[in-house]
Image (tube, grey):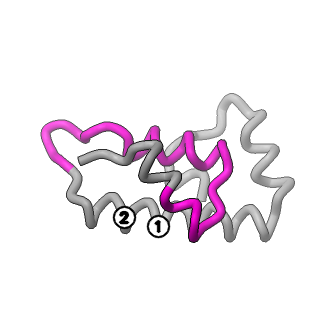
Amino acid sequence: MILTPDMIDQMRRYQRIDARLERMLLEQLGTEPYPHSYTEQDIHEQSRKMIMRYNESLAATPSRIESNTTNPKTRRDQEAIF
């Protein structure tokens, strides 16, 4: 199972998800991690954690988040962003 744009649209009813966060979610959870696979619970739990950390960091220091997007040497994985 993978995260789809339709699933993200459903999550938008309850949580704030902007275009940048949507891209991050789809990059991280939009493909199966061969040879493993995600369960529905994995998708929901991991996306919930990513959304929560993203929104907390965005509210705390918006300038830090914006500056990371312009630095080409900045890591793009989930741990580096949050």
Q: Residue at x 60, y 67 (%)?
A: 15
Q: Residues within 10 Å of mark 2 (few under 14, many from 20)?
A: some
Residue 62 rendering spot, x and y as whole percentages? 82, 58
Q: Residue furthest top?
A: 72
User: Does residue 69 show up magenta in the picture?
Assistant: no
Please tell me the numbered disc located at residue 17: none
Q: Which residues are magenta?
A: 10-37
Query: Label 2: which residue?
Result: 44
Q: Nearer the viewer, residue 21 or 76?
A: 21
Q: Is residue 78 above or below residue 59?
A: above
Q: Residue at x 63, y 61 (%)?
A: 54
Q: Is residue 69 left or right of residue 75?
A: right
What amino acid does circle 1 point to? Arg
Tell me whether the residue at label 2 lies in contact with that at label 1, contact meaning CB atoms closer than 8 angstroms: yes
Residue 39 rendering spot, x and y as whole percentages? 21, 58
Q: Nearer the viewer, residue 2 or 46?
A: 2
